[in-house]
Image (cartoon, grey):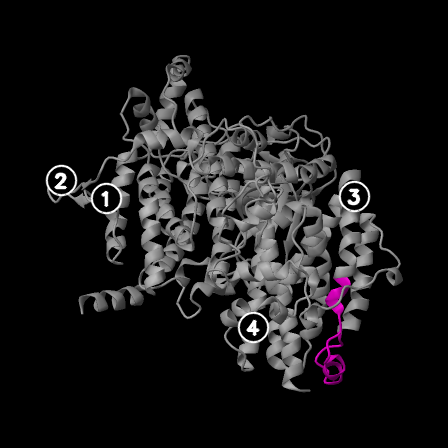
Amino acid sequence: MTEEALKDLLYKIADDLLILGHRNSEWTGVGPLLEEDIAFSSMAQDKVGQSLAFYNLLHELGEQDPDTVAFTRNADQFHNSQFVELPIGEYDFSLIRHFLFDHADYIRFSMLAECPIEEVAQVAKKLKGEIKYHVMHANTWIKQLATANEEAHDRLQNSLNEALPYALGMFEPSKFENEIIEAGVYPGEKAIEEQWKENIVIVFEQAGLKLPDWDTVKPVYGGRYGKHTEHLQPLVEEMSEVFRVDPTADW
Amino acid sequence: MYGGGQVFESSSVNNELLKDEDPQKLAEFEARIARGEKIEPNDWMPKLYRKQLIRMIEQHAHSEIIGALPEGTWITRAPGFKRKLALMAKVQDEVGHAQLLYGAAETLGKNREQMIEDLITGKSKYSNIFNYPTFTWADSCFISWLVDAGAIVNQLANARGSYGPYCRALDRICAEESFHLKYGHHCVIHLATGTPKQREMMQEAVNRWWAPMMHFFGPSDKMSTHTQILTKWKVKMATNDECRQQFLDMYVPKIWELGLTIPDENLKKNSETGEWEFTEPDWEEFKRVINGDGPCNKERLAVRRTAEERGAWVRRALTAKTKGEEYVAPLA
Amino acid sequence: MSDFLNSLDPRINRLNIPAEFGTTFPSKENKDQFVTFEVFVQPKENKPYQHEGIVHAPTIDMAFLFAKEQFSRRGMSCSGVWVVNTNNIKVSPITENNEDIYDFIHEEIMEGVEKGDSEKYEIFHLLKRGKQHSHVGSLEATCYEEALFKAKKQFQEEKSVLNIWVAKTEDFLKIEGDEFADIWETLPEKKYRDAMDYKATDKIKKFKAEQNA
């Protein structure tokens, strides 16, 4: 396997986490209830911290330092799925995204924990526990809220319908897909997607939420290749607004 | 984070409240406080004590939740990973402090939703300093270091007070504030010793925030009989002037050592009295802002209210889950 | 743009808050006050669970989600969190500092009390006003009163106990043990939440030296 292929994999993981961490941090201070404000902020911090761990791996592979990589690129240089860059919307959308993303990430990290590249496996193993709580959080919220009353159920169902095409974009195969699978780094995006579909349906059944026939959901691809919605560039500029005043300064 | 001023009611209503108390119970209560013991929720306490504590703790809690907003402004923009993670955690702490403080106030008999309603309807106050805007990153650094430093002065004093649940909350809060203080100082040091542009940003922030900072501790206290009793009951632990003096003594030298100037040419320590002298803050401005006419009052309440409104469906749905279960106040 | 509140905070601008809110805010419906759960945290294995505070939550599983981040997001380690609905804790009277509440508990407290099947109860002590309640152990009993009476035999100590909390074990949600150890595993690495991580005295020294030069 080439180093380029590995870097591509690490970049997409790191960029997903960095962007979603920033999006979720937008709720800090304005969440729907105090305790949830705190819990959701912790998970946003975890995401940003996890992205840093992957940028550090990239740095060890010769990429620039994490701050430079994270805060000086333009949107078209980001490998995140479009799913994570969408605005936070109402809380139902943010919760559904949190649920769909963290279920996928838990599978991804579990697979990477078995990765033959020791450095990657170590990071994945360590961070898996954080994501385990994120999944507990997501499952409990979705189950409790969707079964609480009609309003909440309908909001979640609508957000789910809206989110699914983008969520499938998380599993967009990279151009190195076969190379990575053959090298045994992890079983690949298709495998994550299959497992993910099995896992989420269990919760949705308990929650009374309906999944459509998967054949009717057209995945929104492009993010892994630098193609993004109009929402990413403004966010990237915002994230780096102060840093870019003088990237060489010590902030 | 929380300062002084505008906390205590000083109307004759309070003397009325005190008149009917059982003298023997009152004597036992006062003896307990004099012995340095804490009062716990199920202990007998005078109505006035309960009322003033609710008022004080509630305002403290509101200040935390509103205080999350001016710094929250910089969460997505904080420069680099280290600052981002720290600022997210710091603002989260402020929300967490509100949660702890509301819990302490609840033990006295007012539920949290009622307190939040009083905040968003404008009935209940919060610290004035959060009605000022954070124009630049340096403003948020000023708050993290110096506003939190001021709050710590105040909170450490209150943590020696007489009400158990409030003291427990404050112990926790002060431990977390030490992170805020160090983080804020770290940020300010980096700006003040950094590039000319960074230095300029920092100096401008000091210029903007000095007046609100002096207001933070509230006007000079006039020691009425009313505040005397609150001091005796260890509700009020230090005067506004004492807190302000302590703050100046601890932090002015630290600001100066970074080569920053403070926009008050009369500011100096009197070597004979050991007291800091300064230009009298503009208390008319202070009153004007407290009464709603500050640069950000409207926005702060609008944002808080929006958070309430847009979160209402979540709470409505979830309360449907617990029908039949009774709310009770926290035990401790 | 003018229809919306124009904030310095880009996050707030994206919320599209109407610019005019008016000056009087309507009262919010006072109906969404959740019930109360008491939270106990074990900082590390073999240490007693300590009362840390409360969360408001609609259900006990959500209470845990909230309690974990409000009360165990800092520190070098955490090995467990318990939550219990406040309604399910029975509280003894509180004594003076030099008195032991157990001295006031006699067999008579069980008279006329309805007994159920024997089950497990958890006992918590407060040793000093201003401090936190701490878990001392569990025992089998047929009612709260019997649990309290048995606690006297089992847990009365030399130091006087001011106040006792008793609750049925089955009323707790306990997240602890090997199954959950990994959710706290990265705690020691969250250095950015810790004051220790922000040392800059060298920078000040260097700056001062440059100023003096």
> On what subunit does the disc labeled 2 rest?
B
What residue lies at 64% left-to-right and 30% top-to-bottom? C110
- Label for residue A55? 4
- What distance separates the C-alpha of mark 1 from that of mark 3? 58 Å
Mark 1, mark 3: which one is toward the viewer? Answer: 1
**Chain letter of the residue beneath label 1 in the structure image:** B
In the picture of the structure, the residue carrying the numbered disc 2 is B273
Q: Are marks 3 and 4 on the same chain?
A: yes
Which amino acid lies under the numbered mark 3 shown in the image of this protein?
Answer: His
Mark 4–mark 1 Cα distance, whole angstroms, equals: 46 Å
Q: Residues within 10 Å of mark 3 (few under 14, many from 20)?
A: many
Please report, as a chain letter, where disc 4 is located: A
Q: Which residue is mark 3?
A: A153
Q: Secondary structure at mark 3?
A: helix
Res B120 seen here: yes
| Magenta part of the chain | A167-188
Alpha carbon of mark 2 to alpha carbon of mark 4: how far?
56 Å
